[in-house]
Image (cartoon, rainbow, N blue to C red):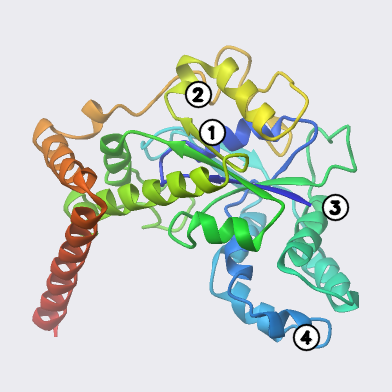
Amino acid sequence: MGLVIIEGWGGSGKSLLLSYLDSHSDLLALPVHDKLPYDLLKLRSSQLNTLNSDIRHIRNTLSSHSYYNIEYNAIREQIPVLLSTEKDDTINVPFKFPFEKFESLWKAEAVAEKYFSREKLLDIIYTKFFEVAEIEQQKTNSLSKNFVSLGDARSCAPTKFLQEYPNSKIIYVKRDISELIGIRSNRQTPTGLAKGMFEKDFLSVILSAEVQKIIDYEHKIKSAQTNNSDRVLIVEFEALFDDRMHTLNNVQKFLDLPSEKLFPTMMGYKLGDETQNYGSQKNDSVHNLLQPTKISYVKFFEKIGRKSKIFNKILLLSLNLISFGIRALRYILKW
């Protein structure tokens, strides 16, 4: 199994790159942010070795994270593709998916398996996903074993991820931090989704040290790339618009794939036509999202954080302590 994880912060353009890779004939792209590769890292070797006789470990592990996002979207029978921070600026992609059948199939194969590794278990789950999913345009290469999924930058250091999944590669989508903070503090939950999934105010984003966390993760990505240059690729978000064809060709070359013309799709459904589609224009501009004063605050925290890793760690810790103190004070006053 080949596993490609598209990493980046929330709002960085991960889903946009995923939609392009979804259209490649040799790739199978997970449309739901399932985070399964990270969940399975929580399983110890001793637990993996007993999965064929005791599946409770994996049940407990999956129940605490985003695996059930698959079921949530299956019940809704659609997956929203967010085009901007606006509440209903979305494309709803049909998602016909028999979740109970999917669970039954992968668990039955897992129980019958004699030897386990995390990659093997992930391969079983993802393979069964695509066996039961209704895809608009089926892949010509039905034997494809290259899966693409969205990453979760907060869950695991990239170097550890590469060690635990030897047949994996990481593509990191890098975006201007001011724009990321603007999106994080302005994105609204689309109609039909659980209220509060996205909403955050600017102050809470700053005090939760998101600027420092983004910088810290960028350092980890660059370190992983230095040690694994053939397995980590950094893609600039702007390049997906300004130099799309060259950028996508570089991505395909990095993944050792035959070059194809890529266009945004999800589950085989085209996200627009050749001229007006998901990636045809950049919808969120920092100057439309944040006031000049707020942009200055972000730039200030970024400037300090980029001076050195030590400065960034100190600032991250300080902001976390302030945030904890504010939450504690609110709780006391409410009590």
Going from N to C along the chain, the mark reached first, 4 or 3, is 4
Q: Nearer the viewer, residue 2 or 311?
A: 311
Residue 70 point in image, percent of width and height: 64, 58
Q: Residue furthest top?
A: 275
Q: Above or below — where is 293 with respect to 331?
A: above
Residues at badges 4 and 3 in contact (C-beta under 8 Å)? Answer: no
**Residue at the spot x=81%, y=62% of the render?**
124
Q: Above or below — where is 13 with respect to 113?
A: above
Going from N to C along the chain, the mark reached first, 1 or 2, is 1
Going from N to C along the chain, the mark reached first, 1 or 4, is 1
How many numbered discs?
4
Label 3 packing within 10 angstroms: few (<14), some (14-19), many (20+): few
Q: Tell me the mark number nearer the camera, choosing from 1 and 2.
A: 2
Residue 44 point in image, percent of width and height: 64, 80
Which type of secondary structure does the marked residue at label 4 adopt? loop
Which type of secondary structure does the marked residue at label 1 adopt? helix
Q: Which residue is mark 1?
A: 16
Q: Tell me the mark number nearer the camera, choosing from 4 and 3.
A: 4
Residue 318 point in image, percent of width and height: 15, 64
Q: Disc 1 to disc 4, how far (Cα)?
A: 39 Å
Label 1 packing within 10 angstroms: few (<14), some (14-19), many (20+): many
Q: Which residue is mark 4?
A: 50
Q: Disc 3 to disc 1, how far (Cα)?
A: 24 Å
**Residue at the spot x=81%, y=73% of the render?**
107
Q: Nearer the viewer, residue 65 or 147?
A: 147
Q: Disc 4 to disc 3, how far (Cα)?
A: 26 Å
Q: Which residue is mark 2?
A: 240
Going from N to C along the chain, the mark reached first, 3 or 1, is 1
Amino acid residing under circle 2: Leu
Q: Which residue is mark 3?
A: 131
Residues at badges 1 and 2 in contact (C-beta under 8 Å)? Answer: yes
